[in-house]
Amino acid sequence: MNTPTSAYDRVAASFERQGMMRLLGAELRRVEPGRVEIWLPYSEILTQQQAGFHGGAIGTVADVAGGYAGLTLAPEGMEVVTVEYKINFLSNFTDGTLRVVGKVVKSGKRLIVTTAEVDHIGADGKESACALMQQTLVPVQQTY
């Protein structure tokens, strides 16, 4: 296995291994130390019964964005796993794209706390709050 040369390389290599992100159509857009941005374009496969983005899809991408933000600060040879998260759904949308920004709040040796802000971007470019997540991660030894 090649050793990633940057936070982006490390996150992008892991993101590529996530079948769920491919299934949902999620796009890794930005990686910085302590911050990751993922976009999720609207699709009929992502909807709930009222044609809006499904909360499960929103929660999944928020979890991944926060997790990867934590991974950018974890030591080499370590991964992170989610031990809990809480999400508030603020609004729902039936079009456009979701921009999910995961940010590290506190990075420790045993726990990493992150947030993810989920914003909707409409076809007109208007941005609206969609969801807010807080997450706790634990670093674990890399196994692949």
Image: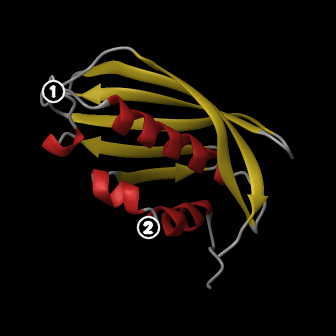
Separation of residues labelled 1 and 2 (CA atoms): 27 Å
- Residue bearing the label numbered 2: 16
Image position of 46 with respect to 27: above or below? above
Residue situated in front as seen by the camera: 7 or 14 = 14
Which quadrant of the structure image shows residue 130?
top left
Q: Residue furthest bottom?
A: 1
Q: How is the image coloured?
A: secondary structure
Image position of 29 with respect to 57: above or below? below
For the C terminus, the image quarter is: bottom right
Left or right: 71 as drawn, with respect to 116: right
Left or right: 106 as drawn, with respect to 64: right
Q: Position of residue 37 (x, y in %)?
A: 45, 44
Name the residue located 35 percent from the left edge and 29 percent from the top edge: 55
Kind of residue at badge 1: Thr
For the N terminus, the image quarter is: bottom right
Residue situated in front as seen by the camera: 67 or 105 = 67
- Residue bearing the label numbered 1: 94
Which quadrant of the structure image shows residue 84?
top right
- Under tag 1, what secondary structure? loop
Residue 79 marker:
none
Crowding around mark 1 (Cα neighbors within 10 Å: few <14, some 14 to 19, many 20+) is some
Name the residue located 30 percent from the left edge and 51 percent from the top edge: 24
Residue situated in front as seen by the camera: 14 or 29 = 14
Kind of residue at badge 2: Glu
Name the residue located 26 percent from the left edge and 20 percent from the top edge: 92
Q: Position of residue 32 (x, y in %)?
A: 57, 50
Q: Position of residue 110 (x, y in %)?
A: 85, 44
Q: Residue furthest right?
A: 109
